[in-house]
Image: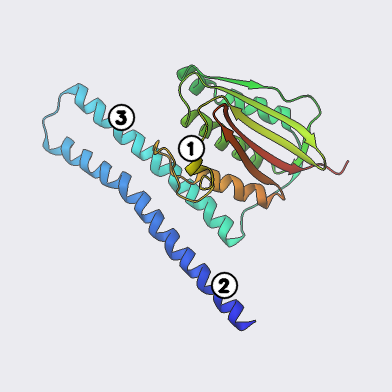
Amino acid sequence: AFNTMQHRLSTADRARKAFITDASHELRTPLASLGGYVELMREEDLDEETQREFLDVMHAQIKRMTKLATDLLDLSKIDTGSLAIQPERVDLRDLARGIAREFEPQTQQQESEITVEVPEGVKAYCDPDRAAQIARILVDNALSHTPDGTHIWLDAATDGDRAAFTVRDDGPGIPAEDVDKIFDRFHTGDKTGGTGLGLSIAREIASAMNGSLGVETGEQGTTFTLRLPLPDD
């Protein structure tokens, strides 16, 4: 028993050190970029167009760091077991419609489309805010990793003793070499500039709600399925 405990502590310590190293690396990159642009703006006599270009890049890096800080806070709560979960009856059609509305500006910009196909009466027993967080991660992932004009479907159904909420797209699919890694922390796949934490957080939150998150992909697109407990009544 002592050896088992020692092994677990050693494994946890290695994971903690690896996490700190990865997080530090992820923060250094946007900070270094910001510092470089600040120095250029201080030392160079830049025209208005170049200044605007630099400010746009700096704004994007600040957004990236803000997102990373939020993700790291969620992971810290998950790792320490302090993630707050308050389950209740959740109407998955209402949830899907709300998420689709949130992403309307982005889908219009990318000439993409989100279609909600959730039938009336499909409900799950979960934390509504956390379920919406997972849905946002999945939709954002679909928009970020597919070409403009991609079609995304949000669907849900009762599957045995589970409610299954799906986010499906008709994009090019996930490369075979990345499928087994997409839920790993800091794995960014096609290097689109994300933190590589979203899907890992989504799966861990699903597990915290006694659910699961899986993926199926191919040349015809990708489908993420969030399975959650059904309400008792």
Viewer-proximal residue among 189 and 153: 189
Which residue, given by chain and number where applicable, does mark 3 sit on?
A: 56
Which residue is under mark 1? 175
Numbered circle sitting on residue 8? 2
List x then y, in percent, for residue 18: 43, 61
Which comes before the other along the chain, label 2 or label 3? 2
Position of 20 relative to 179 (above/below): below
Give the label, 2 or 3, closer to the camera: 2
Q: Where, by quadrant of the figure, is residue 166 drawn?
A: top right
Q: Residue 25: image x %, image y %?
A: 35, 53
Q: Is residue 113 left or right of residue 121?
A: left
Residue type (three-letter) at the residue carrying disc 2: Arg
Quarter of the image with the C terminus is top right
Residue 191, by quadrant, is top left
First reached walking from the N terminus: tag 3 or tag 1: 3
Q: Quadrant of the N terminus?
A: bottom right
